[in-house]
Image (cartoon, rainbow, N blue to C red):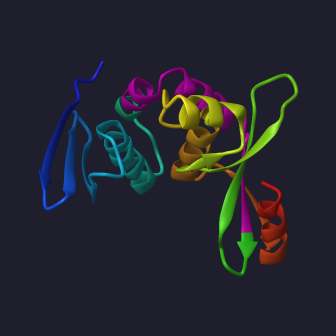
């Protein structure tokens, strides 16, 4: 297991996070009130994955440490090509449609960083605050970072109708 050192420094209401590992160095600056240290560490790893469009064993270990079983489940969803990005044209705005793992194979609409229509999002994240995000959000973020989602193009009007039903 890779040793990860996380250092936080606060000044003028900004948090600076440095994540160091054998192959990872990332620096993120955000408002300290908006993210926890875990969220900052995850964001640094996501940005590094996005920049290379690949993921290392060290990055997988860090994300697994931060998100646990939800991350394992998310990787299965991505491996099964269960993430669609529905993009409106011409605006380029998008929402993800992510398949569930149950036998019913339900699909959930989500925004990778702040919303999912699944029960777990409302129960574990919103109500209980026990998780940072659900497996569908993680699958969407991983697929986006790696560029391995299924792209579905619709008109902006069609996207608006779809979103109005959430």
Q: Position of residue 136 (x, y in %)?
A: 64, 38
Is 39 located above or below residue 71 in the figure? below
Residue placed furthest toward the right: 104
**Foreground of the two, 143 or 52:** 143
Residue visible at 62% across and 36% down in the picture: 121
Q: Position of residue 62 (x, y in %)?
A: 36, 30
Residue placed furthest toward the bottom: 90
Q: Position of residue 33 (x, y in %)?
A: 31, 51
Q: Quadrant of the C terminus?
A: bottom right
Residue 166 falls left or right of residue 113: right
Residue visible at 21% across and 47% down in the picture: 17
Q: Quadrant of the N terminus?
A: top left
Q: Magenta span has 147?
A: no
User: What is the quadrant of residue 151 in the picture?
Assistant: bottom right
Q: Position of residue 79 (x, y in %)?
A: 66, 33
Q: Magenta span has 79?
A: yes
User: What is the quadrant of residue 125 in the picture?
Assistant: top right
Residue placed furthest toward the top: 1
Residue 106 falls left or right of residue 124: right
How many circles with numbers are drawn on the protein? 0
**Foreground of the two, 159 or 86:** 159
Residues rendered magenta in the picture: 61-87
Is 85 located above or below residue 108 in the figure? below
> Secondary structure of the magenta portion, mostly?
helix
Residue visible at 40% across and 56% down in the picture: 51
Is 161 located above or below residue 110 in the figure? below
**Foreground of the two, 41 or 30:** 30
Residue 61 falls left or right of residue 108: left
Residue visible at 39% across and 52% down in the picture: 47
Is 6 located above or below residue 31 in the figure? above
Residue 145 falls left or right of residue 120: left
């Amino acid at each position: 297991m890779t040793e990860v050192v996380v250092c936080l420094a606060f000044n003028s209401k900004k948090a600076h996070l440095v994540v160091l590992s054998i192959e990872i160095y990332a620096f993120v600056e955000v408002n300290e009130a908006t993210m926890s240290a875990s969220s900052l560490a995850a964001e640094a790893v996501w940005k590094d994955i996005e920049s290379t469009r690949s993921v290392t064993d060290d990055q997988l270990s860090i994300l697994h440490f931060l998100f646990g079983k939800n991350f394992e489940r998310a990787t299965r969803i991505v491996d099964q090509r269960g993430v669609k990005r529905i993009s409106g044209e011409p605006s380029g705005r998008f929402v993800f449609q992510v398949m569930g793992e149950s036998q019913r194979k339900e699909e959930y609409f989500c925004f990778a960083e702040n919303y999912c229509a699944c029960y777990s999002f409302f129960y574990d994240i919103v109500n209980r605050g026990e998780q940072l995000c659900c497996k569908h959000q993680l699958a969407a973020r991983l697929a986006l970072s790696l560029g391995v989602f299924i792209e579905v193009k619709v008109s902006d009007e069609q996207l608006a109708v779809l979103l109005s039903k959430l």
